[in-house]
Amino acid sequence: MAKVPVIEQCVVSDGFNQEFMIESLAHYLDRNKNLVFPHRHNFYHFVLFTKGGGSHTIDFERFEVEPWQIYFMSPGQIHTWEFGENMDGYVVNFHKDLFKDVLLRSDYLMMFPFFSGLVRDGVFVIEEEDRNLVTEILDRILQYRGDVSFIKASLLYLFQLLNRQRISSFSTESSVYNHTLLRNFLNLIESNFKSLRLPKEYAALLYITPNHLNALCKELLGQSAGEIIRDRVILEAKRLLVIKDYSVAEIAYELNFNDNSYFTKFFKKAVGVTPEEFRKKLINHI
């Protein structure tokens, strides 16, 4: 069965460290000139653009490149790009277990919204007041990239710095609580979307009422809880439709639909086209 290409760390690494890589974006693109097809990574990946233009697509959402934009990707997300000339910045890849020996919580990275695997959280522009410090951290990591302990400490510092941009927008204790509750809901969806499809099932896991969950989602994301669950199922369907030899019936089974026709109706209602039509359109753009 054909699959979306999975890019291994060793393939794109500069050979210095198989668990971690940092490199100027210009040099990275020069070494990986053919890396323009849709692909997945089996590692965490982020890029900071300091100059250049073009676009990049993560999980079928397209973004125009602008200076000081940063994007984060978690293992499993689908990615491609179309960059212009004179691109530069920083690119960082690191193994999913890089922090395993220094962090007590295995899910620690999930505390940071940009590592949630949700595109809405993974692409943003760094605030002007933090730009010099961010580049200073990345330059120091480049300088001492042979020191694994320094790399780990510096990356965690960088993640905390970037996370501060989000936290600073939460003005009250109740606001922080609501965002934490929402994050827990999204994490539960990530683990259970194939088997749990009803908001009341997630509300029970969060020890709140379905009405509370729905109001929270409406307030913070502008969508109902049911729409958010549906969108995660649709995203997985789109990811699987990239696999050309994976039949629609197989995708329906993989996503725990009772039959192919119900899956097709579900997909068309959300996307506006059938799974086969979506696949044909996607293939024509590859």
Image: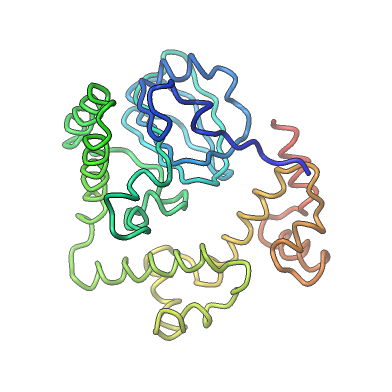
| Number of marks drawn | 0
The front one of 148 and 12 is 148
Residue 156 point in image, percent of width and height? 25, 45
Residue 206 point in image, percent of width and height? 41, 79
**Left or right relative to 101: residue 187:** right
State the residue at coordinates (21%, 35%).
Answer: 150
The front one of 205 and 43 is 43
**Left or right relative to 248: residue 161:** left
State the residue at coordinates (73%, 43%).
Answer: 243
Residue 176 point in image, percent of width and height? 24, 67
Residue placed farthest to the front in the image? Answer: 101
Quadrant position of residue 19: top left
Relative height, residue 181 to residue 89 (above, below): below
Q: Which color scheme is applied?
A: rainbow
Quadrant position of residue 171: bottom left
Classify the position of the C terminus by image quarter. Answer: top right
State the residue at coordinates (64%, 48%).
Answer: 239
Classify the position of the N terminus by image quarter. Answer: top right
State the residue at coordinates (74%, 36%).
Answer: 283
Relative height, residue 85 to residue 66 (above, below): above
